[in-house]
Image (spheres, helix red, strand yellow):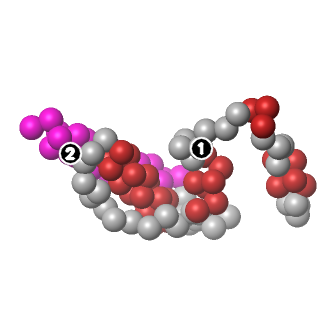
Amino acid sequence: KFQDNIITLVHQAMKLEYTFAQDVFPKGIFGLNAEGFKEYIQHIADRRLERVGLPAQFHSQNPFPWMSEAIDLSKKKNFFETRVTEYKTGGALNW
């Protein structure tokens, strides 16, 4: 069945992404670690599955809500009606 094949592919992709996260974040850095990244990927996978009418598989919470704000694809904006805020965010960083 096509839907079952998609769900299997999502599970395989999750395993690959988690393996990648373990390699990239073996000890964690700046609040990011492999376990948090795994939860985030599961959260995104569930959202994608639900958008195409398939059931969620992982039921994970989003551990990085700030990341969703930065890269969420569901936000549609008119470029000419938005305000530049990136300068404010970058200016608040303490180096």
Q: Residues within 10 Å of mark 2 (few under 14, many from 20)?
A: few
Say which quadrant the C terminus sits in: bottom right
Quick check: 41 left or right of 46?
right
Amino acid of disc 1: Lys
Going by the image, does 50 lie left or right of 8? right
Decide which of 23, 21 is in the foreground and name it.
Answer: 21
Q: Position of residue 53 (x, y in %)?
A: 27, 45
In this view, the residue in front, 84 or 8, is 84
Which residue is painted at 29% across and 57% down in the image? 56
Residue 21 position (above or below residue 73):
below
Predominant secondary structure in magenta? helix
The disc labelled 2 sits on which kind of residue? Thr
Q: CA distance from mark 2 to mark 1?
A: 28 Å
For marks 2 and 1, the one nearer the N-term is 2
The residue sitting at 52% across, 67% down in the picture is 63
**Residue 42 belongs to the span the image colors magenta:** no
Q: Report the magenta residues as a range.
A: 1-24
Q: Is residue 71 left or right of residue 44?
A: right
Who is closer to the viewer here, 1 or 11? 1
Task: State the count of labels.
Answer: 2
User: Residue 46, relative to residue 33: is it above or below?
Assistant: above
Q: Secondary structure at mark 2?
A: helix
| Image height of 6 relative to 24, above or below | above
State whether residue 14 appears in this view: no
Q: Which mark is residue 8?
A: 2
Q: Is residue 95 visible?
A: yes
Place of residue 40 in the rendered image (x, y in percent of width and height, measured from the top left): 47, 59
| Rendering quarter of residue 8 | top left
Point out residue 2 in the picture as x, y percentages from the top left corner.
15, 35
Question: Which residue has dot 1 on it?
Answer: 75
